[in-house]
Image (cartoon, rainbow, N blue to C red):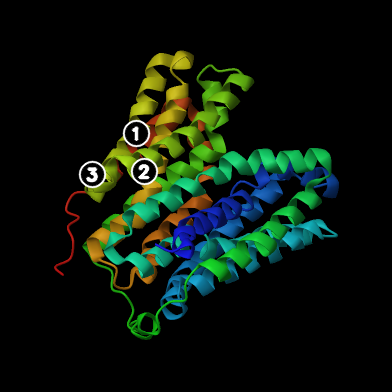
Amino acid sequence: MSLRARLIVPVLGLGQVVAFASSYYLLGVLADPMAQTLRIEPSVLFTALSAAFLISAVLSPSAGRWIERSGGRRVQAWAHLAFAAALLTMALSPSAVVLVAGVAALGIGMAIGLYGTAFAVLVELHGAGARRSITAVSLIGALGGGLGWPVSRLIVEAWDWRVACAAWALAHLALCLPLTLTVLPRPHAATTAKAALEPIRWDRRMVQIAAVFAGGWMVSTAMGAHLPRLLGQLGLGPEQAAWAAGLMAASAIAARLFDLVVLHRSHPVATLRLACLFHPLGAGLAAWGGARLAPLLAVGQGAGNGLLSVAAGVLPLHVFGPERYAARQALLLTPARYLQALAPAAYAIALDASPGVALAASSLVCLAMCALTFGLRPSGR
């Protein structure tokens, strides 16, 4: 294997780290100083982030078709440009209106620059044998949260939030974009030429998979927004809750590593079922043990989310094969992107009722996801 071929997974993984750190996890550190500078409420910025999720959902099907026509390499390059443009808009924003527009514009980069495009590149290269590469990219990408928050915090403490936005834009332009164009191979002309023009028709299996991923992403986004508060209501102090919430990222990385080393030969549906059960297990133990076992909620959520990210790339490949993978996966994840925008507000209502109601609601979603995995068999190929 050539050096260039060996660098494909690290380059795709690095792109995911920078993409997630500069979009999903950006406002966790920057929202308060942004709001103070421009004299607005932080909630306005999080509303703009919800708008970014909606933009991503609207654009996702078109993004999948674009990958089919042009190949993942070109789309990934444009994604880095889109992220950089949004971040520079935020860094240079003279008013709250421009800042909010910049946050919402992150949705363009999310639609074309997150896991889906990277996984499509690997399927272009490896076909049905792309599982381990997909898991490896997912494993590296999981560092986006673990590294994004502390890096952004260091920059804000040393300078300010505008420099942080500009630094992430520079990472896209000066690091990720050149590596993408240099390392990732151009798609074969035959691959892009045979991309079918007919729309992909939904069948029972597509509906099942889309519903599973929608539930998983809804729970994941709700936990990302409310986990420290939920742990506090279970009896942990602020510092303990923050420490326990950090276990979610660590367990997500551990789950991906376990899949890469141990589960890579297992049936993807079995991996998905295991992912669905981790959150209810952690939630049940936390509800039973109170503050003493509350950190297990973060561990269960992280492990389930880690395996779910792998399944999002592998299950469509297993059930439908590599043919039209990019367009089909984009369709399957579109409902999940819509629900991501609604999940924080919906889960806040459940949490206001009680932590028990919130845990029961998210656990029931995960158990319903597990039930929907039955009957997922590969197409006759």
Of the residues tagged 1 and 2, which is closer to the observer?
A: 2
Earlier in the chain: of badge 1 and badge 2, it is 1
**For residue 237, side relative to residue 372 (left or right):** right
**Residue 53 location (% of width, % of height):** 55, 57
Residue 352 shows in this picture = no
Q: How many marks?
A: 3
Amino acid beneath label 1: Phe
> If you read the primary sequence from the N terminus, does the residue marked by circle 2 or circle 3 appear first?
3
Up the image or down, 239 lies above or below 201; here it is: above
* Mark pair 1, 2: CA separation: 10 Å
CB under 8 Å between discs 3 and 1: no
Structural distance between the alpha carbons of marks 2 and 3: 10 Å
What is the x, y in percent for residue 253?
45, 39
163 vs 48, nearest the viewer: 163
At 47% across and 79% down in the image, what residue appears?
Answer: 70
Residue holding disc 3: 270
The residue carrying pointer 3 sits among few (fewer than 14), some (14 to 19) or many (20 or more) residues within 10 Å by Cα, namely some
Verify CB contact (< 8 Å) between mark 1 and mark 2. Answer: yes
Residue shown at 39% from the left, 55% from the top: 134
Relative height, residue 188 to residue 346 (above, below): below
Residue 216 left/right relative to 369: right
- Where residue 207 sits: x, y (%)? 28, 60
* Residue ID for mark 1: 278
Location of residue 211 with respect to 305 vertically, above or below: below
> What's the residue at 37%, 31% (across, down)?
360
